[in-house]
Image: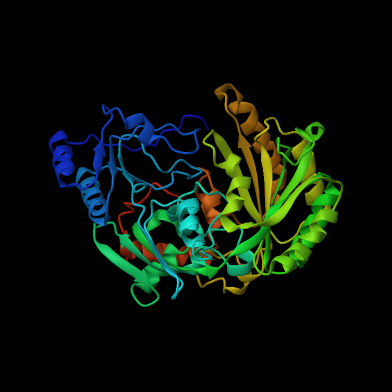
Amino acid sequence: MVMQRASDSAVLDAVAVEALRKRLAGDLVLPQDGSYDGVRKVWNAAYDRYPAVIVRARDAADVAQAVRFARRQGAPLAVRSGGHSMAGHGAVDGGVVVNVSGMKGISIDPERRVAWAQPGLTAGEYGEAAQAYGLATPFGDAGTVGISGLTLGGGIGYLARKYGLAVDNLLSAQVVTADGELLTASESEHPDLFWALRGGGGNFGIVTAFEYRLQPVGTIVGGAVIHEATADVLERYYKVAQAAPEGLTTIAFLMAAPPLPFLPANKVGSLVLMTTFCYTGDVADGMAAVEPLRHIGTLVGEAVMPMPYTGLYQLTAEGGISRPHAVRTGFTNGLDRDLAETLIKHARAMVSPYDAVQLRPLGGAVSRVPAGATAFAHRHQSMMLSAWGAWIDPSEAAQNVAWLQRAWAEIGPKMDGAYVNFLENEGPERIKDAYPELTRQRLAAIKGRYDPTNFFRINQNIRPAPAA
């Protein structure tokens, strides 16, 4: 698990590397450069990879140059925006990394409620720009995540039940394809590619600009309620979250209680269910919608208040810190007593204060999109569930991974499907879990048209179908 390396690499021609440098508007970083170590690292510190070349792209032309260079050199190519890939796919040993994190342009049209945004933006940066107009696009639950990878895998966050996923609010994308060409994908241009980008991950090209729909999200009711964790509490939480008005989206964490200003000191470290939430709509209605969450068990702390939408990212800031992580994920259509007791049993056996089980009830706007409308096909599922192991000291890796494996050995068989953005390097069977058969077949056919040689393979890979 720790310090993993990619299997394929290439010896790059030094003259060609210098020629590439001269063609770039951005920067080219090599292993001997002082900035190399800082630039090559990714968020999941369990992965420590050493690219031969890092292109810090300034624009789409730089991205295209990097793609053509890697193809000519026969080098593996990885793409990095926010760097939050659970599998460390933002870097590759001995290959080329296209780092688009410096491409942070954004334009907001508040009258049309449309945003144009480059892929280097984080959800927090985009959110702050849109918040100035009382608008937002549904992204995830952490402000440090790059919008590109988050969007391409689906995007499940605090606005999901009200406004759907990030992919449900994507209007178009500019994409550099495997042959180095720049295309626009939308419902009217390259609609097959547009379908694939909405959930198919990084298999089809490098997105250099997104056009999103903006939703009215002014002051929200947000915060957290924290309860002593029991199987009863988990069951009640699920029922309350499913019965809540669609304006209320919750994300709950079964975890050791962190030190928070609104939590008694004697509860820190105890096993709790911390339910974070976002209500979009009238503030009084939001306070009423949150009230049932307060009564699902023994309440040990709470912070419920009107706030800006981006204020939620402060609640999840700890999860955005770079440290080694391991994760497993799946979907379920219910939370019965057996599953609740299984979750509690393994939560009590957590070995790190950073270990957690995360529950994301869905439904609402997510479920009203037809399963075949996008490459994210898990529309019928009522909840996503993920187990996380995280640590700081490398000596703690084995016991944390062992805890996760034991827990998932019992939890996994109760799941149906997987969220591609939360997959590690778990093999082709888990990619099949992320994409139902018909979805996978369609993705493979589109991959065959736009990337027939599987050039974009440092990802949760969909192999191209042979040409008919």
Residue 124 drawn at (x, y percent): 50, 51
Residue 454 horizontal side relative to residue 331, left or right: left
Residue sticking out furthest to the top = 395
Front position in the image: 183 or 271:
271
- Evaluate whether residue 39 shows in this view: yes
Q: Is residue 13 above or below residue 285?
A: above
Q: Is residue 260 above or below residue 371?
A: above
Residue 43 drawn at (x, y percent): 48, 39
User: Which residue is rendered at x = 46% and y = 72% of the image?
Assistant: 113
Q: Is residue 270 above or below residue 216?
A: above
Residue 232 drawn at (x, y percent): 86, 51
Residue 264 horizontal side relative to residue 391, left or right: right
Q: Quadrant of residue 406?
A: top right
Front position in the image: 390 or 302:
302
User: Which residue is rendered at x = 23% and y = 34% of the image?
Assistant: 11
Residue 447 horizontal side relative to residue 231, left or right: left
Q: For the C terminus, give its image quadrant.
A: bottom left
Q: How many marks?
A: 0
Residue 355 drawn at (x, y percent): 66, 37
Front position in the image: 193 or 322:
322
What's the coloring here? Answer: rainbow
Q: Quadrant of residue 310?
A: bottom right
Q: Quadrant of residue 206?
A: bottom left
User: Which residue is rendered at x = 50% and y = 57% of the image?
Assistant: 127
Residue sticking out furthest to the bottom = 188
- Evaluate whether residue 462 shows in this view: no
